[in-house]
Image (cartoon, grey):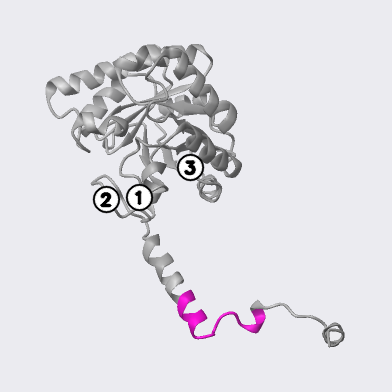
Amino acid sequence: MAKVTTQVLQEMKKRGEKITYTTAYDYSTGLLVDKAGIDVILVGDSLGMTMMGEDTTVPVTMEQMIHHIKCVVKGAKNPMIVGDMPFGSYNVSKEQAIMNATRLMKEGGCDVIKLEGGAAVKETVRAIVDAGIPVMGHIGLTPQTISKLGGFKVQGKDAEAAKSLIEDAKALEEAGAFSLVLECIPAQISKMITEAVSIPTLGIGAGIYCDGQIMVFHDMVGLFDKFTPKFVKKYVNLTDIILKALEEFKEDVKAQKFPEEKHSFGIKEEELERLY
């Protein structure tokens, strides 16, 4: 598998080939996702919830993002690596946005960056792109501004809101974004957006008409159980499997069944005798 680039994603959209996209936050997971042949990895600020136990993505810092991106990059060589711009890292000024996007690329090693927002951030997107950094947009449900949106709710459910989302998508494309994440948007509206822009759309809870689909790794494999969104398909429940293994380890140690001789190292008898 060759390295996935922005051009590769564009060609996939033209061919009608669906794009696969999941998250990873560490070396081991990045390695697995790469081996599975997934096209794109998001090192998302969702790590605040899945890895750090936060209630939202808001507390995540630039330093934490850079740390996790570096780990994933070491494990995943072929997928496109997307670094998430955390809350507060791009809303003060264009200069701040360029500086922090540059840090994710230089210090983290990601291929592109992602930021949330529609038409309101188009000039920020334009500035980052003009600085030579590819930008993935993100509209619909934007977790960083969840308090403003009134919670984790589907966006674009009435005509006015849907029209605004379509305009957001067009504005981001015009500003230079190479692709768009559509989160928690009615499938019919995602279809309209996908047809209205020439760049790939990547859906998470946005129906079947997007050019690709995203799933948070921890949701997919059953490692996050605080809540399960409607759009999640759980392919395996690793929580139960891992918990069973831990319980069996505890029982073996308590019952002195582990370690066995095959798990232990020895020393030659003549060397042992020299100790007496």
The reply, left or right, for residue 202 in relation to residue 245 is left
- Mark 2 → mark 1, Cα distance in angstroms: 7 Å
Q: Nearer the viewer, residue 129 or 80?
A: 129
Q: Is residue 25 visible?
A: yes
Placement of the N terminus among the 4 image quadrants: top right
**Quarter occupied by residue 49:** top left
The reply, left or right, for residue 18 in relation to residue 109 is left
Q: Are marks 3 and 2 in contact (CB under 8 Å)?
A: no
Report crowding for label 1: few under 14, some 14 to 19, many 20 or more residues within 10 A (C-alpha): many
Measured from the top left, where is residue 267 in percent x and y? 79, 80
Q: Is residue 257 magenta?
A: yes
Q: Amino acid at mark 2?
A: Thr
* Element marked by disc 3: loop
Name the residue carrying label 1. Answer: 219
Indicate which disc, 2 or 1, sits on the residue closer to the N terminus: 1
Q: Residue at x 45, y 22 (%)?
A: 135
Q: Which span is picked out in magenta? A: 249-262
Q: Amino acid at mark 1?
A: Asp
